[in-house]
Amino acid sequence: MATVSFSGVGKVYRDGTRALDDFSLDVADGEFMVFVGPSGCGKTTALRMVAGLEDITEGEIRIGETVVNGLHPRKRDIAMVFQNYALYPHMTVYKNIAFALKVRKTPPEEIKRRVEEAARILGLTPELKRKPAQLSGGQRQRVAMGRAIVRDPQVFLMDEPLSNLDAKLRVQMRAEISRIQHELGATTIYVTHDQVEAMTMGDRVAVLRKGELQQVAAPQQVYDRPANLFVASFIGSPEMNLVVAELERTDGGLVCRVAEQTLAVPDELVRARPALERYAGKTIGLGIRPEQLEDAALAGDVPAGSRLRGKVVTTELLGSELLAHVELDAAPVVTQEVREVLEDVDRSRVVELESEARARRTVVVGRFAIGSGARAGADVEMRVDTRRLHFFDLDSEAAIESQRGDPAPSPGPAARLET
């Protein structure tokens, strides 16, 4: 196996469209790296550039110690798995998996050994004599993976390989691909727009937006410490609640004023994010994950600085929990990404958000226990886990949480709807 290194890589198409901009990233030997982001963010372009299916406009890509910018795809020693299986319908599973080896004129005994080993890893041994039409979608995807495995490449590239499967099969195949990758110890770059796949499969996750790298970190770190508003709103389902707040200094320390309500900022949080001190007296973006909001009626004794009141708009019963949509007296934070999407597809929604901001209305989502009595139209008081609050600079969109006291890198100017 080998490392993969991107150094200042850029891609500009003939019509002037920039798909990737100054992309720099190192994928370690044996690492499972996931590229995730919305459609058009450049993740598939980056993958295809490694494969040699897209020319590199700027920068340099290395596989191991070899610069591959001008290297023919066949000489890169990579194997790619696509979302469409591209199996030969007239061939058996055995012959589909063995095809690339046969083209290479690999000795028959070696072909047999590699195919049988790949079939064992993939659980396809009983299916070797069957044809693709006789297989399920998950089995076909495993055959496609088998073709890649037998080649024993330096790097595996996977471009949304599970997008054609139904929800249940996707869950099963996520676990299968992770198991296989770790068993093989294979350097793998996996592209997906599905954040659940990114969070459950990758050793590290690279979040992209408009061709620019936003954050690279372990999945849990991306979730717990998003670098900016885009990552915060993109990673998480339901997404992070974002409201405009005032950060103020009081005798007891820092507090967040959400309209007429106040949340105390724990001292340990201020120590972990020393940059917060510089934002005292300023307007910031406050982020609260849904699991940080619970029905205060079920939470026992809740301190005054850990409560938010609102009116329940609707609820969703999910069996194990209740998602409560609660309207707060607070202005919403609207990221640049949201504004651009809405202006492209629904200008009226931007107008609606501006109206909500002036009226100081934001609907947040909380994960309530099944025993909650929250019902649409009723007032509710929520307990807020203030130890896990998130804070953002509304001008740069960067998270206010650097250990050095400096805001994290940001994607550019924020779009803010204020009163």
Image (tube, helix red, strand yellow):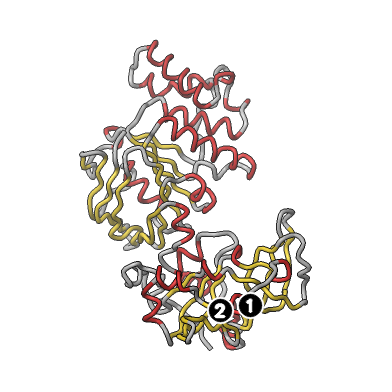
Residue holding disc 1: 308
In screen coordinates, is 296 left or right of 403? right
Residue shown at the point (48%, 59%) measured from the top left = 223
Residue for point 56% across, 83% down: 354
Please state which of residues 386 and 7 is positioned toward the viewer in this rendering.
386
The quadrant where residue 291 appears? bottom right
Of the residues shown, which amino acid type is indicated by label 2? Answer: Leu
In the displayed structure image, the side of residue 34 where residue 366 appears, left or right:
right
Question: Can residue 345 be seen in this snapshot?
Answer: no
Residue found 30% across the figure and 58% down from its top: 12
Q: Position of residue 144 (x, y in %)?
A: 49, 31
Residue picked out by circle 2: 263
Q: Return the residue nearer the eye: 240 or 146.
A: 240
Answer above or below: position of 154 versus 8: above
Q: Residue furthest top?
A: 109
User: Quick one: SS at disc 2?
Assistant: strand
